[in-house]
Every structure is written in C-alpha cells, then in structure tokens.
Image (cartoon, coloured by chain):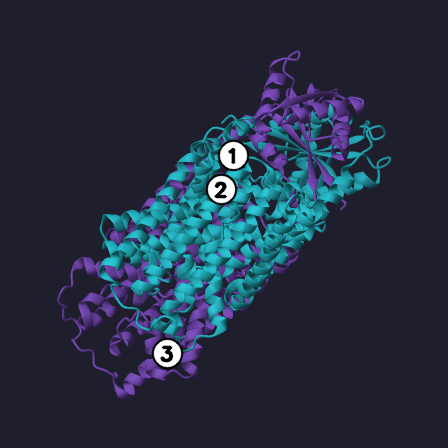
Chain colours: A cyan, B purple
Amino acid sequence: MHGEWRWIHPVLVCLAVLALMMATVNFSVVKRALVGRPMKSRELNQAHTKLMWLVALPILAADLYSSVAYGPEAGMTELDPLGAAAKWLVLPITTATVLLLCILIVSYMMGVIAYPSGGGAYAIAKDNFRRPWVSLLAASALLVDYVLTVAVSVSSGIQTMASSYPALTRFETTLSVACIVVILLVNLRGVSESAKVFSLPTLFFMVCMLFLIGVGFVHEARLGPSMPAAPPFGSVPRGLTVLLLLKAFSSACSSLTGIETISNAVPIFREGKNGALKAYAVLGAITSITLLGFAYLLYREGIVTNPHNTMLSELVGRYFGHGPIYQVIIWATLVVLILAANSTFTGFPQLAALVANDGFLPRALKLRGDRLGYSNGMIVLATLATLLVEVFHAQTNALIPLYSIGVFVAFTLAQLGLVKYWLKTRDRGWRVKLVINAIGVVVTTVVCFVVAVTKFTSGAWMVLVVIPLMISIALKVHKHYEAVAKELHIDLQVDRPKKHRVVAVVLVSGIHRVAIETISYAQSTCEHVLALYIGFDDESIERMEQKWQEWGSPCRLVAVKNEYRSLLHPLSRLIRRLEEHEGGKPDHIQLIIGQFIPKRWWENLLHVQTSLLIRAWMIRHKDVVVVTVPYHLQS
Amino acid sequence: MHGEWRWIHPVLVCLAVLALMMATVNFSVVKRALVGRPMKSRELNQAHTKLMWLVALPILAADLYSSVAYGPEAGMTELDPLGAAAKWLVLPITTATVLLLCILIVSYMMGVIAYPSGGGAYAIAKDNFRRPWVSLLAASALLVDYVLTVAVSVSSGIQTMASSYPALTRFETTLSVACIVVILLVNLRGVSESAKVFSLPTLFFMVCMLFLIGVGFVHEARLGPSMPAAPPFGSVPRGLTVLLLLKAFSSACSSLTGIETISNAVPIFREGKNGALKAYAVLGAITSITLLGFAYLLYREGIVTNPHNTMLSELVGRYFGHGPIYQVIIWATLVVLILAANSTFTGFPQLAALVANDGFLPRALKLRGDRLGYSNGMIVLATLATLLVEVFHAQTNALIPLYSIGVFVAFTLAQLGLVKYWLKTRDRGWRVKLVINAIGVVVTTVVCFVVAVTKFTSGAWMVLVVIPLMISIALKVHKHYEAVAKELHIDLQVDRPKKHRVVAVVLVSGIHRVAIETISYAQSTCEHVLALYIGFDDESIERMEQKWQEWGSPCRLVAVKNEYRSLLHPLSRLIRRLEEHEGGKPDHIQLIIGQFIPKRWWENLLHVQTSLLIRAWMIRHKDVVVVTVPYHLQS
C-alpha cells in the first residue's frame, strides 16, 4: 500500500498528456482507434437478441456469484483480533448470510412478477411513491453501490492475483486503475454483441468453485481435515461482543450485492418472466451451496485471514499446491471479478440515464455515444471508481464497509415499494406476496440498520453523507431544468421572430487582410458599423487614425487609448455607451473579432489569442452577439 | 530527496484547483488580491528613479555575490573522492576562480564603455554579428542560465536552512517550489518601487561575510587553526587527475554567474557609466576578498563537504557555535540567495521581451502585465525553474554542472562582439580595450571548453542539447511571423472592404425563446436564412416540421435525420452543399448558435454545450463565421 512505485503514475500521466496532444492533432483518429466506428441508432434494436434462461443466467450472475470470492473473507477479517478461537464463527456467519440471501431472492422474485418489463429499485420506488426523494434515495444508493462494486471487484481481483504473484503487491493500485481503464474502453466500444461470450467465464468459475468444494469433501472423507480446528465448535472466544459479531455479519453481507441484476433485465429472457424466476431460483441455490461449502472447508482447514494471501487462494493452495489447477482457479476468479465490474458498466449508465431522463441528473448522461452505450455515464463511473481505488489504495477490506449500506437501502426501498404495489393492485395471490415482501422489508431494514451502526466509524458515514448530498443535488438539478423549461416556453401563435436593430462593432488591431475581411463582413450584415481600435499609447493611435484616412475611412473608427493595456475595459465601455445612447438601445450589438487559425497547432502559441478571452468574457457578462470570423493562415 | 512527504504535493494541487475554481467564479477578485490594482503605462517611466552607485551596487550585486555561498563548496564536492588529502586544493582552485573573475570584470567594464545605454550579451552580439543565430546563441545561453540561477539559488538557500534545521531536509523540494511561487507573486505585483530596500540584505550579507573572515583571521592569529590541515599544502593526493582538477574548477566557476547584471543596468546609475565602472571595480574587489578569505579559512579549519551541512554553515558554527550570530548569518544567506533568484525575475523577462520584440519568441512575452512587468516571461521562468527543482529534487550539486556552461557561452559571445566593436569603431584607446576583450575571449573560450568537456556526462549535455533546440525554435518562430506579416499586408489604395454575399444557417434544437432570438438575429442581418434541425429519429423530425408550420414557417427549415447522433456531420454536409450549389459560393456562411449562459457556474454542467464543440470544430476546419447569440438564463 505504501510502497507503491512512485514512477508508474507520472508515466501514466505522461501517456495521458501524449494522448491529449494526439487528440488535439487528430482527435477523431484516436477516438476511432479506441472506440470503433460510430453506429446507427437503429442498430440498437438489432443488438437486443433474447437469450435462453440458461445462457442468460451466468451473464447476470457474475455480480452476485463473484462476491463469493470476498464475502466470507470480509466477514472473518473483522474477527481477526479474536485470534484462532474465532475461526468456527465462519459457519454461523455464513449461514446467516445465506438465509438473508434466500429471503432476498424470494422477495426479488416477487419483484419480477410485479414488474415483468424489468424494474430496479428506482423504477419500483418511482412507481409506488409520489415523493421524488424516495426514488432518488434508491437511485443514489444504487449508484453509490455500482461505483463501489467496480472498486471492490477490481481491487479484489487484483488482490487475488497478488496472492499468487507476490511481486505484484506493490502495484495493486496501479494495476486496479489500469484494469478499470481497460474495462471502460471495452465498454465504450460496446459489448452487447459479444455478451454471450461472457456467460462462459462465470459458468467456468461456478464449476471451479463446485469442483473445489467437491474435492474438499472427498478429501475430508478420506483423510480428515489437514489440521484440527483448535478450539471446538461453539466455544465463545474471549473478547467476542455482539457488536463485533454484527460487524462481521455486515461485512459478510457484501457477498449479497448484485441480486437485483436479474430483476433489472427481465426483458432479455426468451422465456419472459418465467425464465427470470427460474434463473433466480437456480442462482440462489448455487450461490447458497457455494457459500456454505466454502465456509465449511475454510472452517475444517482452519484457514485464517492474511492480507497477502486471500482465503480462497490459501484453500486452493492447500488442496492442489501451486500447480496448474491453482493457476486456473485463480485466473478464473480474476476474470469473474472483472466481469462483475464489467456488468456494472451496463447497470450504472442505464440507471443514470433513467434518472437523467426524469430530469434529476445532467442531460449529458442520457446521450448515447458513438457505440450506442451511455458513454458519459461510463466515464463518470470509471472516474469515480478510480478515485475510490486511489484513495483506498486498492484495499478491498477498506472499501467493504462503504459497500453494503447502499445495497440494503435499495433493497429496503424496493421491498417497500412492492408492499405498496400489492396493497394497491391486489392481484391473484397478493396476500402471500405481500407477506414475503413485508418480511423482506423487515429483514433488510434491520440489516440496513445493523450495517449503518456497526460500520459507521469505519467508513459507512461517508455513504450516509454522500447519499443525502446526492438527493439534494438531484432535486436542485430538477428545479433548474423546470425553471429553464418554463423560461424558454413560447406561445406558437404569439411569439414570432421579428426584425431587430443590430449595431456592429469590429475590433481591429491594424489595417491588414483580417481587417478587410471583418469589416466587409460587418458591412454586409449590418447598417451601423463601428471599428474599434485600442491603442496603448498616443503614437499608435495617431498612426492608426492617419492610416485609416489613407484607407478612405470605410466606416467610423473609434480609436481609444487604454493606459492599462487592457482590451476588455474600453470594449465594455463602448458597449455600455452604445446600449445607453445612439437613439435607443439596439436589440443586438454584434462584436466582430477576427481569429487567426494557423496551420500547425504549435503556431497557436505564437499568436496572442486575446480574441478567445474577449469572446469568453463578453458572452458571459454582456448581452452581446460574438461573431468570430476565422482567418486561415496559408503559411 | 527520497523521504519527501507524499501529501504535500497533492495538497498543493488541491490548493491550485481551489484557486482555479475561485478564479472561474471571480477571476478578477483573486487576481486583484494577489497582484494588486492595474497600473498605467505612463507609471513605467515614473518608476525609473536613478540611483547613486553606492546604493545601486548592492542591488545589482546580489546575483554575483550570493554565489560565494555555494561556489567554493561546488568545487570541493568534486574532489570528495580524494578524501582529506585534497583539502588544500580549495586554495589554488579559488585563486584561479578569482583570477578569472578579475579578467571578466575588466572585460565587462569595456562593455560598459562601449554600450553605456546598457547592453547584455544579446544586445552586443546582435549589434556586432549579422547572422541572427549568434545573438540567439547568446540569448538562449542567458535564458537557460537565468532559469538555472533561480533553481540553484533557491535550492542552495533552502539547503543552507536545512543545514541549521535538519527537520526541513525532507521538505527541501517542496520548500524550494513554495519559495519560487512566492518570488513569482512578489514580482507579478511588481517590485520596482521597493528596489532600494533590496540593497540592505545584500549589504548586510557582505558585512557578515567580511566580519566572518575578519573573525577567522583574528582567531587564527591568537589561537592558531582549530585543527591542523592533515596533509601539508602542496602534497599531491592519490587519484588526482587533471580532469578531476578541471572539473572542480568548472564547478567553482559557478560563483561567477551574475557578472553581467551591472552592464545590463547602466542606465539606472545616477552617475552614468562612471558609476557603473566604479560599481564593477568595488564589486570585483569585495567578491575577490571574500572568496579568497573564505577559501583560506575553509582550508585552515580543515572543513570538508557534507551533504547535510553546507561548508558556510560548518565554518560559522565552528567560530560562533549555533547561537544568535550563527542564526543571523544563515538567515542573511537565505535572504541574499532569494534576492539573487529575485533579480533573475527582472533579467529573464526583459531579455525574453527583447528577443520577442525581434520576432524570435512568441509575442505574448512582450506584453506588459497589469503591474507593468512582463508577467508572461515571469510565469515561464517560474514554471521552468520549478520543473528543474522538481526533477533534481532541489539538490544544488546536481544542478551546478548544468549551470556554468551557459554563462561562459554568453561571456564568450559578448567579448567576441566587443572585439568586433573595437575593430569597427577604433575609439580613443581602442587598442588597449581590444587587447583586454581579446584576452577575455581566449580565457572564456578555454573555460567554456573545459566546462563543456568536464561536465558533459554529469548534465552539461542537456544544456548542449537545449541551446541548439532553442535556436532552431527561435528561427522557426521568426520565419512564421515573417510569413504571416507578408500574408496580411495589403495595399491601402487597392484593397478595400466590399459588400459580401452572406448566407445564414441557424442551428435550432426546438421552437422556444432561444430559437426566436437566433432567428430574429439572423433575419435582421442576412437575407438568406436557413434553419437547421438535426433529429435522431423520424418522430422528432416529423414533430418539428409540424410545429414549424404551426409557427408560420418564419424561414426555410431543413430537418435532417442523423442516425449516428452527431451534429457535426450533417452540419458539415449542409455547409458543403451551400458552398457548392445555390447560385455560386457565398462569400460568408454564418453559422448562428444560441448559447445558454446560466447564472451559477455549476449549472453549466446541466446543459450539453454542444455549441462550444461545434464552434471550435467549425472555426478550425471550415471557412465559416461562427456567431454565438448568448441567452442569459434568468432562473
């Protein structure tokens, strides 16, 4: 964490600067190379091929199932101070987690039944609560959680790699950031075409985990545990408090993130909502078996947490040594964790676009990029995740406390929304569903509370600060958009364009080809043309006035001396004068500025582009139409 | 160097970002607070008060005299590998340096006689050599040298402080950078008013050094040296080579930088050139005495170099302990070294402005800032010096090898220019002056060669790469300016503005208040108006066309569908069509874009400012007049 090689980052910065420079030269070439050719809007519908539930399952499972790799470990890390005596606690904690998992899966299956067109916590909350802050609470919690998923999954994947290649330990942060950048680029290119491919690694990882558990049981049946669990099951270790136990449970709950993925994606199932329900049932079963089996083996083998070697790596190493099987499982873990992060790059931008569409987030988030994905949302996600990884030095255990709270807030709101939904619709069998979701509400509320309290000091407070902040920003954004819409609205029958009186001010720096162009332009568009020359001393003004006469005074010249060598002030003064006198305020004052466009980018440094400054300042502070007449230099 | 606290820099970056944000909100307030009220051009002449030579001397001496603090040490550091046996070599090396100093001072006095209006190496070379590269060589060498003076002086000052407060050692880089920033700010405010104040610290430092030497001699006369010099004077230490000796001499020559200051500043002497000559003579005498005395005491006290304690600090500590006298001398050293860096903030921007005025550097360098100084030059100097300090971690000894070569190149060219001058003018007594400068040429050429060869591998190669690079850039810049001037030139009698045919394209995103404004404007300035609407799907286009009809079709509407969700391409296509058809190419196509100006800066994030992008792209790639009509949001 602290031994990070200090040059990697400068090198990355240099590369970024280089990329930026290339971009200035030819941005589109770089963009095409990285992102690929632009795609037509109509290709969006073609890409939406429906999938059989067995194929869709592993794709949607990556987020939830991958957390198996760090969930139990996150829980046990909390019990570190108790020493070996607490080892057996991995069993009850994991069992509690699995129980919670089952409750949540059943609750979410109710969600699928209620919203077969797909609906995450935000959609459910929006549909069932009138106050926007409720759905915004769900959205904020989910968005925060998506960011954390990327940070946690990538960090955890890299940590697993570092367990098997200790030389990588000092580069964890850098590798994690690189990983996020690669995932971002892949997603900017768009991955929907190859989505089916993504089912393989998760499927393979599932097989690996089940195989590992199978081998473990066979191993135990034949040889007994390699090391007897020192203190017997059930003995209360010294120093164990309820708070500590709850804390461990909260951390273990991080393996429950990603449950909502299937309910968001019901439309992609060829079988419709039945496919989604089947997928939920199977996923729940496999995840439960894996968690319980994994926890049992950890207990029997007496494996303890170790910051330099994940428990999974330790367990695999114990059964298979560090040979090819170990390598395969470790790499599969990395790949599946990266897929989990990857799936977030679909979830976050979609949710952000949904919220932006309702006017609660900047509009830019609902624009589709060249490859039809919500590029801006992806970039925001990658930036935030990178920031988190940098700040927490890619330490999974430091990130986990921030993690679970968002999930459970969203869970609770979704359940609560469903409860309201059942009360409202009273569909066939609504009572059972109501009870299921009501249990869901109670359980998730309790867990939410437990997580918030036990993790408050170790980071959850940040989330508890960030979420209300996000909600208040979202409400402000909405207010702004509404005010703007009201302000821009016109009556089609009454408000029509009409002729305006326009006065032109041409800024001239001398009499040369640019001046000819700008004055010609001004005189062709406007009756009242004024040329403004700003000199810094008396001689230059005299010289200009004389030359102007020689030139035949094409229009009135105002030559002002500015002793402060500023262009802005005399210009503002002239504009104020034009606004106040000269037979009533003109409707528009157009300020005409010539701008050099050199052929080579570095030549920009040779021309004092005061015009840019003037343009930026004027347009912001005055009601002036700024006209830029380009002069493309030949030489 | 390696223990630098890793958070200081992020904190600085944050402060910079904060400053930037403040600047966005209200740049002028921040600027006023830091830089002060703007000043009139005519105040420039008022500020030039002439000074008596005795007052001017210490002001102009800071650069040269301050190098006493690091020159001898720089030389002895090279002999470190020889151990204690080489201690006595401090005497011959310093004597050689003093000899060189005397030759240079006499040569420069000739320069003052030849150019009483003040002339640095650049002016002398420009006046006497027809080829621009010669004067550019002098200018580049001097500019490089100025940057190094800042880096070396500041680093050396901070190192002296760190010698007395070892806790500062790990912050050397950060403190040096902070120091440069403060000097920059002070100079941006302008310091000419308070210049007289600057004579005091240098004067005080001179007194301190002479006092130190006096005490040393008294001490020795009464008690003898505190430690006999182990190997007797004149014994050749093992491992001493001519190369090593020359290397040590080259490093010691770094105490000769800053000689040219007086010859640049002749006009500020009330007594004219006689004052300057007197100042040179006195400064030469005092510096020689100080260098010789200091070297003698170093030898007698047997002081060796130590990276954590400068030789000056060691010597002072030996005589006075670490009490108040020690503190006073150390602080005086810091102040005088900072003054040396400060004086460079006048020299560099002036020289850069001179070169820019001749068209060899970007014009921005000859603009005077609010406070009449050449602000851009100052900022460039501070940036480059900061870069050097960062790269070399504020280690004076790593910077010194880069240092002397520039000085001696400039010295040589100035002398050579003077030789040509005497041959040309043949003033009274020109023969003597010619001989003096000829000797100067020979000596400085030899030293230049020695420095280049002995320091080549330890950094001088960088300077030897940078200087030719600078010359070639300067020549390219000149060529560009000449070509532009030729291209812009017009015949006042023939080339006059004339009426142009202008076609307006208004970019509309819908029918609302902004559209009314832009179309009204277009119709008031132009006969041919086209409204362009770019839709991403068929429905939006149909809706727009229908609404347009309801609105009474104020002008022709072109509604295009773009399936790639791009505005740039359809716009370019339309412009190409306008240029090719429609009864001959119009002289100007004006592209009218409405731009939202929100009241609060953060609201900019809520509006997709495609207009900015379009503007930037169009003006660079097409011959299109871009018109930005601001719409200031009320809400």
User: Mark 3: which secondary structure?
Assistant: helix
B299 in relation to A301, above or below: below
Which residue is under mark 2? A278
Label disc, if present, on residue B336 of the rendered structure:
none
Q: Amino acid at mark 2?
A: Lys
x, y (%) of residue A326? Answer: 27, 51
**Dot 1 crowding, Cα within 10 Å, few <14, some 14–19, many 20+:** some
> How packed is label 2: few (under 14 Cα within 10 Å), some, or many (20 or more)?
some
Callouts 1 and 2 close, C-beta under 8 Å: yes
**Residue A38 % position (x, y):** 50, 29
Task: Give the left or right position of residue B373, taking residue B459 as reference.
Answer: right
Q: Tell me, yes or no, whether dots 1 and 2 are on the same chain.
A: yes
Q: Which mark is residue A271?
A: 1
Q: Earlier in the sequence, mark 1 or mark 2?
A: 1
Mark 3 burial class by Cα count in 10 Å: few <14, some 14-19, many 20+:
many
What residue sits 38% from the left and 82% below the top? B322
Task: Name the side, left or right, on which B36 lies relative to B300.
Answer: right
Work out whether residue A7 or residue B158 is closer to the camera in this orientation and state it.
Answer: A7
Q: CA distance from mark 3 to mark 1?
A: 95 Å
Do circles 3 and 1 both sit on a common chain? no
For the residues beneath circles 2 and 3, the answer to whether they share a chain is no
Q: Which quadrant is the N terminus of chain B positioned in?
A: bottom left
* Disc 3: which residue: B212
Foreground disc of the pair 3, 1:
1
Question: Between marks 1 and 2, how big is the CA–CA gap?
Answer: 10 Å
Which secondary structure lies at badge 2?
A: helix
**Front-most of residues A416 and B76:** A416
* Chain identifier of the residue bearing label 3 in the image: B
Identify the amino acid type marked 3: Leu
